[in-house]
Image (cartoon, grey):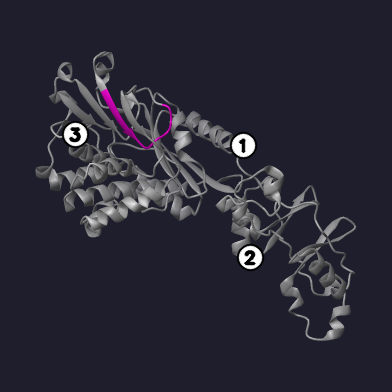
Amino acid sequence: MHIVTTHKGTDFDALASVVAANLLYPGIVTVLPGSLNPNVRAFLSLHKDLFDFCTSEKISLDEVRKLIVVDTNRWDRLDRLDPLKKNPHLEIILFDHHTNEGDINSKWQCQEEMGANITLMLRYLKAQKKSITPIQASLFLAGLYEDTGNLTFQSTKAEDAHAAGYLLENGADLQIVGTFLSPTYSRKQKDVLFRMLENTSRITVDGNSVSINRLRVHGYVSNLAVVVQMYRQILNVDTAFGVFEMDGNRCLVIGRSTAGGIDVATIMRHMGGGGHPGAGSAMLKSADPTVVEAWIRVMIGECHQASVQIRDLMSFPVLTLNSETTMSQAGKVLREKGYKGSPVVDDGKLVGILSRRDFQRIKKEHHLQSPVKAFMSTNVMTIHPGESPGQAAHLMIKHDLGRLPVVDEGKIVGIFSRSDVVADLYGLCPLGNCLATGCKQNIFCFDTS
């Protein structure tokens, strides 16, 4: 017997992957876990006549000679298949888009970082020129969209986008995809959400706003991930964690994050779960929710200790002007240096900032002899060197700023500009750094002045 299976709590990407495996390996038996994502369960209830699935208790594990595992690489995420680990003659094939180290030792594997596992499967389906039906294409696209957030998650790769186009070319129905990916909110879900909103808290880590909410949940509540996502959106935080104390002395942890927020997957993997940078979960047994929350806080700090900070990208030393400098002199200095603005400092204290737009306020020639303090902006927004580029970008967008003085203990230690934000977003090198560092990407350099 040859079987294919996937992880517990099967989502659309996992379901799509087992269906794709059936196309790649005709004649295999599909073994689905007992626990399915509610949206997947709804999909299968309408389409069960089109697919042939069974559960692990309905097969004889002694007869299994080949095992194909998709969308996971760990035995503990499979449903009641542990006895297969002891079979020395078992041939294992693995398809997984998670790059974390697992304990399933396969004879052949395709393990590569990708937005969705179905994208990897489609690579081989196309290579073998396998035809797919419109309903299969719709299921595959649902899996791809679910795991990439409609191609918006940080983990999304170019190949994911190409795969989406290929599926649309093969008849994927966006209306069907939208129907099954659209979350439904039950009365119990709304009750949990309201209780979470009654007791909110926030912390800030490297410019990322984070909320961790602990809650006791009685009975079964479906799709708590939808609740956590709604909670994150209502609070308008970068990352939200729900720590749900459940019956049976269990603790379910769910995390949702925006692009650039906390890497949820890294934290969940430490807890024995999994996921992606923007979404993940873990189920803990015999765990104190208070301890779990503290554990998350520690891991958030560890995950961001090595992240890029303003001090890593800012320009220094900083050209400054005195408030008594004339506008004519200031303009000459800025033109010679090629700068678009400068902080204004008196006796070591930041008193204002002068930018190119301030010169547009000069209407008469004699105003050029006026001091800088007559035209500079005095409501200066600053940033600490330990903050993140994302926080700087947020301030620049909100206040329409071209640059931020970097201030530490009351002293200017650097300047952070829009160009520095772009450098961080796109991984570009400031002009001149390429020759100094031996960087080979100098064709992308730009002037950060």
Percent from the top left, x then y, of residue 1?
14, 23
At 87% from the left and 77% from the top, the residue drawn is: 370
Viewer-proximal residue, 408 or 152?
A: 152
Query: Where does the image place residue 131, in percent across and percent down from the top left?
Result: 18, 47
Q: Residues within 10 Å of mark 3 (few under 14, many from 20)?
A: some
Residue assigned mark 1: 305
- Quadrant where the C terminus is found in the figure: bottom right
**x%, y% of residue 16?**
24, 42
- Give the distance between the C-alpha atoms of the residues marked 3 and 1, in whole angstroms: 45 Å
Residue type at numbered disc 1:
Gln
Q: Is residue 222 visible?
A: no
Start-end of magenta stretch: 92-101
Residue 433 lies left or right of residue 238; in this view the side is right
Q: Is residue 355 visible?
A: yes
Work out whether residue 160 or residue 383 is closer to the camera in this orientation and state it: 160
Question: At numbered mark 2, what does the secondary structure look like: helix, strand or loop?
Answer: helix
In front of the other: label 3 or label 1?
Answer: 3
Residue to which mark 2 is pinned: 399
Q: Secondary structure at mark 1?
A: loop
- Between 115 and 8, the one lying in front of the other is 115
* Displayed quadrant of residue 309: top right
Specify which label sits upstream in the sequence, 3 or 1.
3
State the mark number for residue 246.
Answer: none
Quarter holding residue 192: top left
On the rendered structure, is 365 left or right of 286?
right
> What is the count of numbered marks?
3
Instruction: Name which quarter of the figure residue 288 lies in.
Output: top left
Amino acid on which disc 2 is placed: His
Asked if disc 2 and disc 1 are in contact, CB closer than 8 Å, the reply is no
The 10 Å Cα crowd at callout 2, few under 14, some 14 to 19, many 20 or more, is few
Give the number of the disc on residue 25: 3
Residue type pointed to by label 3: Tyr
